[in-house]
Image: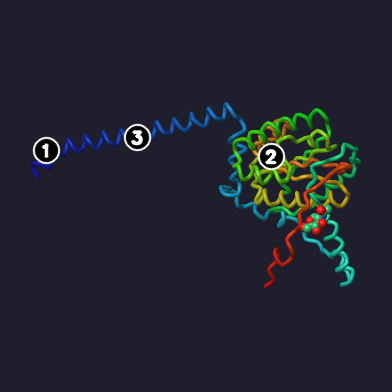
Amino acid sequence: MVLFSSLTPVFVAVLCAVVVFIHKSFQKKDRDSKTGSKSTAESRPWVDEDLKDDTEINSKDEGDWADSEEDVPHVPYAPERYPADVQLQRSREFHTLMNNRRSVRFISPEPVPREVIDNVIRTAGTSPSGAHTEPWTFVVVADIEMKHRIREIVEEEEEINYRQRMGDKWVSDLRKMRTSWVKEYLDIAPYLILIFKKTYGMHASGKKKTHYYNEISVSIACGILLAALQNVGLVTVTSTPLNCGPPLRLLLRRPANEKLLMLLPVGYPAKDAVVPNLTRKSLDDIMVFV
Ligand SMILES: *[C@@H]1O[C@H](CO)[C@@H](O)[C@H](O)[C@H]1NC(C)=O
């Protein structure tokens, strides 16, 4: 007991020292992480906003999940009902049309009527989206100088990708597809369509509005866009330029809540266009019927 009480002041002093030490080191860590993120934000202003896209994981305002649909009155819906034979024929014809779609890198500079492009984009805008947020922006670039600046950004990044980021296997797989980091079609195609996903929007109140499933919503819109292009005899090649999103977003003056998902050069196929002689998987390989 005597021993213990004589040790108590020492024990308390040691405990205090430990507490102060822990406290100080926490403060330091906090400071480090703050200055750390600040300095990266200064040197690359877009990194935080563009790479940290966790809207779907960390969103807190769960209240507006179904807002838009619940607030809107419901009306009868009766789309056309086809007789069985017509239905079958339409399904075949649509498959034939879509089966003819190919990714084409040889695009003609021939002009394409602007109104056709408007309608194709309108069609893409009919896609379903989480809570009807319609989280897409289609930037259509026809301006020659702007197309060239886009090409410069894409080629610069692509060359780095090919040389450094991708493995040898990936590069040799792509060689079969005759791609390289030279993207002439970005200058030649009459239009470039850059599809941005809006990761969040704004309520009228100024509060952030979460766009649930924005990536899958915009991916579906891209699919419908490809079908709409095929329907009017235009070609494209889907590209998702690695690391080009942030500089292209800044070039096109899109806000920070928009991330580049896809870049499509669009036009008629060049007269001498070629595509790899690919075959598609058979129905048995892609469908499981239960
Ligand atoms: C493309 O490949 C298929 C076999 O996969 C072959 O039957 C066809 O002749 C080829 N087409 C051309 C134009 O070479």
Q: Position of residue 74 (x, y in %)?
A: 78, 61
Q: Position of residue 104 (x, y in %)?
A: 80, 45
Residue of label 3? 23
Label 1's element? helix
What is the quadrant of residue 252 in the picture? top right
Please identify, in this view, whether the residue under mark 2 or under mark 1 is nearer the observer: 2
What is the quadrant of residue 93 in the picture? bottom right
Residue of label 1? 6
The kind of residue on which mark 3 rests is His
Query: CA separation, marks 3 and 2?
Result: 45 Å
Query: CA separation, marks 3 and 1?
Result: 27 Å
Please identify, in this view, whether the residue under mark 3 or under mark 2 is nearer the observer: 2
The vertical placement of 174 against 82, above or below, is above
Q: Position of residue 282 (x, y in %)?
A: 74, 64
- Which residue appears at 70% of the width and 51% of the height? 217
Would you say residue 117 is visible in this rendering? no
Q: Position of residue 1 (x, y in %)?
A: 9, 45
The answer as to whether callout 3 falls within 8 Å of ligand 1 is: no
**Which one is in front, 9 or 275?**
275
**Which one is in front, 138 or 65?**
138
User: Mark 3 near mark 2, Cβ–Cβ under 8 Å?
Assistant: no
The kind of residue on which mark 2 rests is Pro
Residue of label 2? 241
How crowded pointer 1 is (Cα within 10 Å; few <14, some 14-19, many 20+) is rated as: few
- Left or right: 255, with 101 as reference point: left
What is the quadrant of residue 16 in the picture? top left
Label 2's element? loop
**Which one is in front, 60 or 105?**
105
